[in-house]
């Protein structure tokens, strides 16, 4: 479940080798004081994500594999205007879809708080917009890696595999920014490299299946969220947890709430009813007043910081989320 944007942005060492290519440029008026950190945060897979970087100058960098090829996007915001620069074969594609990425197709006014907590968070976080990437595999593969393991394990696997089998982001990108491997490259990763990255055979096999059906997977970006989820779940190993995590990012889907998560039902139950033992059914009952906006409601609950106190040890590796 996408939560709060990680803090402590990093510095931005930039590659200096060779001439700096000219970027494609676009400016965009941001709707309603959009907060780039809150909006783009769900795309970041851990503080050392090789495909995403937030730096101290206030810029956000993404390295993507688009239908036009690899691309790098740098976005900053000032005085209600986003300034974007893009490099590589995917530059034009990234700039064409910049409004959707930054939430122009989202409608936060459709959300009506019905709990005091959500009303307060909604008021404090008016810049939250739901990101829409229009890309499926870039969210599907890391979501598969996050199945039934801790986030630290999943982030490590994503980091190691993208750095080893991806390619440096085009343009004057920060050092260590990489475009993830293409579908064929994922299928050619040797079994021992999956093991070295801490990925079990089941998750590795699921990644291979979705990559072998890459064209069909990416077609889901043009479907409704519910249709896209059905398409993704045709692949063995991709279930409701994974499909929801994908369409929340690829489609900006405001109602596709994550079920099968180890933590989320207890967080929602605690925040809205003081019930830390809530299961998926209880969570969905509590979110029913927000039909059409249940994912946004869950995001706001996570941003509230209202987390049930721990009882007992932390969750051990190997059992954090369902398929």
Image (spheres, rainbow, N blue to C red):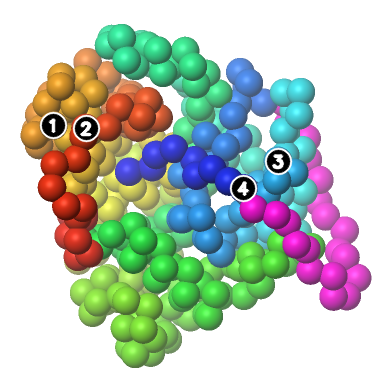
Task: Please tell me which residue is depicted at 51% across the width and 72% down the height of the picture.
Answer: 162
Is residue 143 positioned above or below 192 on the image? above
Separation of marks 3 and 2 at Cα, in angstroms: 32 Å
Task: Please tell me which residue is depicted at 21% across the width and 74% down the height of the picture.
Answer: 202
Mark 2 closeness class: few <14, some 14–19, many ≥20 residues within 10 Å? some
Mark 1 closeness class: few <14, some 14–19, many ≥20 residues within 10 Å? many
User: Which residue bears the numbered disc 4?
Assistant: 9
User: Which residue bears the numbered disc 1?
Assistant: 276
CB within 8 Å, label 2 to label 1: yes
Separation of marks 4 and 3 at Cα, in angstroms: 8 Å
Residue 239 visible in the current orientation: no
Separation of marks 1 and 4 at Cα, in angstroms: 32 Å
User: Which residue bears the numbered disc 2?
Assistant: 308
CB within 8 Å, label 1 to label 4: no
Location of residue 182 in the rendering, given as x and y in whole percent from the top left corner: 51, 73
CB within 8 Å, label 3 to label 2: no
Task: Please tell me which residue is depicted at 27% across the width and 32% down the height of the picture.
Answer: 307
At mark 3, the secondary structure is loop
Q: Nearer the viewer, residue 136 or 286?
A: 286
Task: Please tell me which residue is depicted at 13% across the width and 31% down the height of the picture.
Answer: 276
17 falls in the magenta region: yes
In terms of image quadrants, where is residue 119? Answer: top left
Separation of marks 2 and 1 at Cα, in angstroms: 6 Å
Location of residue 5 in the rendering, given as x and y in whole percent from the top left corner: 49, 40
Location of residue 172 in the rendering, given as x and y in whole percent from the top left corner: 79, 63
Taking the image as shown, residue 130 lies to the left or right of residue 245, namely: right
User: Which residues make up the magenta segment?
Assistant: 10-29
> Which part of the image, by quadrant, shows the C terminus?
bottom left
Residue 271 visible in the current orientation: yes
Mark 3 closeness class: few <14, some 14–19, many ≥20 residues within 10 Å? some
Separation of marks 4 and 2 at Cα, in angstroms: 27 Å
């Amino acid at each position: 479940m996408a939560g709060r944007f990680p803090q402590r942005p990093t510095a931005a060492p930039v590659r200096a080798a060779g001439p700096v290519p000219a970027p494609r440029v676009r400016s965009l008026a941001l709707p309603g004081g959009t907060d780039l950190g809150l909006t783009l945060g769900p795309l970041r897979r851990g503080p050392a994500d090789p495909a995403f970087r937030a730096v101290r100058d206030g810029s956000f960098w993404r390295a993507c594999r688009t239908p036009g090829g690899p691309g790098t996007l740098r976005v900053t915001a000032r005085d209600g205007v986003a300034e974007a620069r893009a490099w590589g074969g995917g530059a034009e594609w990234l700039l064409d879809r910049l409004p959707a990425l930054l939430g122009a197709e989202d409608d936060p006014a459709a959300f009506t708080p019905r709990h005091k907590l959500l009303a307060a968070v909604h008021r404090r976080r008016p810049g939250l917009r739901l990101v829409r990437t229009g890309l499926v595999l870039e969210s599907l593969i890391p979501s598969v890696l996050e199945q039934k393991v801790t986030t630290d394990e999943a982030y490590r696997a994503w980091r190691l595999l993208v750095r080893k089998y991806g390619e440096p982001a085009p343009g004057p990108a920060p050092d260590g920014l990489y475009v993830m491997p293409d579908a064929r490259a994922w299928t050619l990763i040797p079994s021992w490299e999956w093991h070295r990255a801490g990925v079990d055979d089941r998750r590795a096999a699921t990644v291979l299946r979705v990559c072998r059906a890459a064209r069909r997977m990416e077609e889901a970006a043009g479907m409704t969220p519910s249709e896209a989820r059905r398409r993704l779940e045709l692949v063995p190993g991709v279930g409701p947890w994974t499909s929801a995590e994908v369409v929340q990012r690829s489609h900006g889907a405001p109602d596709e709430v994550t079920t099968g998560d180890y933590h989320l039902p207890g967080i929602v139950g605690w925040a809205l009813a003081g019930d830390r033992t809530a299961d998926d059914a209880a969570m969905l009952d509590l979110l029913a007043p927000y039909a059409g906006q249940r994912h946004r409601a869950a995001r706001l609950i996570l941003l509230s910081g209202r987390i049930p106190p721990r009882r007992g040890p932390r969750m051990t590796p190997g059992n954090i989320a369902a398929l």
